[in-house]
Every structure is written in structure tokens, then in C-alpha cells.
Image (tube, rainbow, N blue to C red):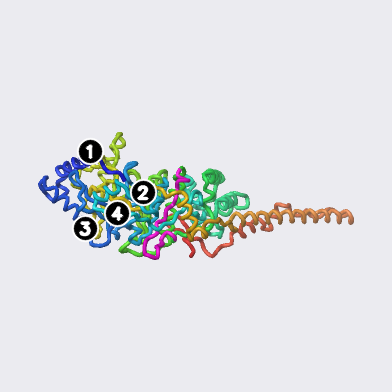
Amino acid sequence: MSESTDATAAGTGKADKAGVTDRADAVDTVDTADTAGLAGRIAAGYAFTGPALDLGALLWDGACLPDRQIRIPLSMLNRHGLVAGATGTGKTKTLQLIAEQLSAGGVPVFLADIKGDVSGITAPGVPGERTDQRARDVAQSWQPTGCPGEFYSLGGIGPGIPVRSTVTAFGPVLLSKVLQLNRTQEQSLGLIFHYADTKGLELIDLKDLRAVVAFLVSDEGKAELKGIGGLSTVTAGVILRALTAFEAQGATEFFGEPEFDTSELLRTTADGRGVVSVLELPAVQDKPQLFSTFLMWLLADLYTDLPEVGDLDRPKLVFFFDEAHLLFSGASKAFLESVTQTVRLIRSKGVGVFFVTQTPKDVPADVLAQLGNRVQHALRAFTPDDAKALKATVKTFPHSAYDLEELLTALGTGEAVVTVLSENGAPTPVAATRLRAPQSLMGPLPAADLDRAVKSSPLWSRYAEPVDRESAYERISAEQAAAEARAEAAAAEAEAGKQASKAAARGTGRGAPKEDPSLVEQVVGSGLFRSLARSIGTQLGREISRSVFGTARRRR
């Protein structure tokens, strides 16, 4: 983690002095020369009595004050948070710093490693001059330490234990987002899932969904949805084309069994440390809608399964959404409402969510309002749009003793403006902070070490090999083949009966008997097609229960 330059420090000091003069109404009235007293009052807002994570030391009047420590209460980590800042300002190292301290405190952590540079969190850091200098600056007792961890991948693409979901469990709301369907198409997809749920048709992979869609617009299946709105051929075509494009992105690998049990993310080690689960995403980083939606599925599944626990002395899990703007880009209103509701409610289940992105405006206002902890790295103001985003960011902070508009453009790498929730839930004073250095490896784990860690995990044998059991596709295909066989048999029997009747008529000289019903009349009248609908529609007892995200509630 690089150090700030003298020019940056001087700029920080200028911002602080200007802030004391211009924003004196935000703090107790003091003489502008009383900077030490004002800095002490800011630092006092971070003097917590319970367990807390150490973020760094206060920056004030151009200097780093190692005796003024900035911290965040462990009990407030389920109040969610935001880590923001321009590219290259140190956001990834900040989430690594927070994650390794959470692990040491017995809290499991989930990290999305989009660029492939977080895997080093499981290995001890490497001492160096810059690390030593940073430790001296912030009064950190730095010791190289790795965290216990597991590495995952989406469907086995790239290194990691494969994470898969069934289509049924994933649900229509999330799938509509990743398929980029409009509202009408999303509602139609919801009807398709409703039909499959109520009729006991398991949608394990994408070919199962294709089979159900094709059946519902066929002559045999059209009547199935007639009473609840029906499915138009045009909409079905759009959905099928979107599925084709989705499969072309490699999505076939992500849907199937064995389905990943998200309770694996809640594990701790025998010595009480939280396991850090790293989802390796470099192999799919060119498919942002796919991995961001899958991350939301993980969170939604946890929300569905976890019991209400209220306020705890430490979270059950802290979940980091890197590149959070990808989650909300092009999202439907229903999806945004579901995200907001999940973030609002999952706190009471002991789960904290941190969004990591470039500016707060990347996160919708209703979601941003739920984020109690803020670590804001430097922002750039090179363009009019940058300047506008900077002003908008400043307005999201409480009043402070700093000139934040100037300070946020002067922060160095590894420095940030911090405000968190205190132990009583009140916001702490805004504090410019020089952050600590992570004690784990600040970089990617060597490929051989990563592969060895993946293959030696006890979870590898549980999830590595895909399973393709009988589901909707196989059942529909079998019933259609059986229906065709019955139709052919009926046709043959009818033809044989007709020939026998003709022969009898010729032998007796009587007129031809009344013609038998046509083949279509026989098949439809005897209920063969209706039998198809009934046989694939055997109910499992009741409709699958779904969460606010449309995800299926796991049957344990």
C-alpha cells in the first residue's frame, strides 16, 4: 500500500484548516488554532468500549496522529456499509483489511474477487519498507498473517469449488434481470415458474426451462395458463432467444446440481476464526450481469434460510459486493425493490452487506439510505461530470470539521474519509484516516497454490462433479414420446378396424358401416393429450414457497 506524498499531506492540511474555518457550526465553537482539541473530540467519537475493528489513524492539520485511532464497532457491521473511491485509491485493500480482522474476530466473510487480486488473503503478507512505514505511521503492530479460506467459482469456470443453482431455486425475478427482460416478459416468466412450481416440474437446468416454455405454447399445453393470463407465442420466443444468448455466455455451467448450500459460507474454524469465502470471478468478469445477479442470489438465499436473531455482539456473516454498480445497471423496478427490501431486512438475520464501488451515486438512494458505515477514498474531479459527482458525494456525509470537497480530491492512496455507527447507533464524526496495511498477502495467490487449496478442500468432492438427474425436460420428453407412441398405436388400431369393416362389408354385401371417429378425434377425445398435461402436472403437495426475490425456499 503506497504512502501519500508531501503534497498530498499539505493538501490535506489545507483542507482541514479551511474546514475548521468554514464549518465551525458543525462542531463546538473553538478557536481555529485549537486544532488539537478538535481532533481529540473527533477521535473521542471512535473510543468504543466493546470489540472493534481498527481502521487506521486520524489525519488532521496535515499530519497523521497515531494516538488518535479510528475504529468501527464489531456489533455495527450488520448495519451495512459502503467502500467507495476512484480507481487505484485502495478500495480493494480496505475490504481486505476489514475482512481479515472480521475473520480474526470469529466472523465469516464472503468476498467477490473480480480482478483476481484478493486471493492472497489466505496467505501471510510480505514485509517491506512501505508496509513498515505505514505501520509506524498508524501505530500498527504488523505481523504477516493469512486467513482460513475457501475458493469458489461460478459453475466451475475458472479455479474454485463450483457454485451452482437450480433454475427453480434461482427464481424468475433474478433470471429476468440477467436475461434483460422487460416488465411484461418478466411477468410472463413468473407465470411459467408458477406453473412449474404448482405442477411439481423441477427446473434444474436451462433445458428444463426451455422444455416447459415450449410445452406451454404447444397445442397440448396452451390451455394450461389460459385461466391466469396465458403465454403468448411472441413472448415465449423472446424468452427462448434470451436463453439462447445467455447460454452462449457460458451460463449452462451455472445452472444444475449439486446445488450449492449457502450455509457453507457461515463456517468457522476449530480455533474460532471465521472462514473467508472468496468467489473467483476473473474468468467471467466480461459477463457483469451474470456474476452480479449470482451474487444477489447468494444473498437472497441466505436471507430466505436464516432465522431472525435481532442485534448480536458480532455478525454471522459480512458480505462484500465489489463493483456494485454492475448489480444495479439496467435493473427493473421489481428487482430494485427486492434489493432494497433484502438489504433492509437481512440486518436482523445477522448479515452485514458492504457495497464497493466508485461513487455513492452508483447505489440507488433507497439502498444507500440503509448503509450505516462509510469509507470514502479519494475522488477525481477532472471533468464536469466528476465535479458533479464529487459535490453529490459531499452532500451524503454529515456536517464535519473538514472541507470535504477539497479533502476528497487530496487524499492519497490508502487514505479515506470515514464515518461509522457508534455502539449506540449514532453516526460518528467524519474523520480523515490513514488506513492500516493488511497483514495478509496484498496480491494474488500463485496459481499452483490456489489450485492446491481448492482441490484439498473437503467441499471439492461434494460439489465438483455435476449431476444430471430426471427433471422437467426428461419428464416432458418421455410423456411426449409416450403420447406419440399411443397416437401411433391408436392410428394403427383404427386402420386395422377400418380394413376389417371393409372386408366384412364385402363378404355380406351390406353397405359400409358408420365411419369411425377420425384420428384427431380419437386422440383428443380419449384424453391422450390431456393425459400428457395431467401426468407432468402431478403436484408435489403444494406450490413452492418463494422469498421476496422469487428464490425458492430451500428444503432442508
Q: CA distance from mark 3 to mark 1?
A: 30 Å
Q: Which residues are magenta?
A: 264-285
Residue position for label 2: 442
Q: CA distance from mark 2 to mark 4?
A: 14 Å
Q: Is residue 68 left or right of residue 213?
A: left
In front: label 3 or label 1: 1
In front: label 4 or label 1: 4
Lower sequence index among marks 3 and 1:
1
Residue 280 included in the magenta stretch of the image: yes
Residue 9 included in the magenta stretch of the image: no
Identify the mark at residue 47; answer none if there is no mark: 3
Identify the mark at residue 7; answer none if there is no mark: 1
Neighbour tally class for label 4: few under 14, some 14-19, many 20 plus, Cα within 10 Å = some
In front: label 2 or label 4: 4
Lower sequence index among marks 2 and 3:
3
Give 188 or 345, whichever is nearer the viewer: 345
Lower sequence index among marks 3 and 4:
3
Q: Is residue 84 left or right of residue 449?
A: left
SS under mark 3: loop
Could you tell me which residue is drawn at 52 percent across and 48 percent down?
251
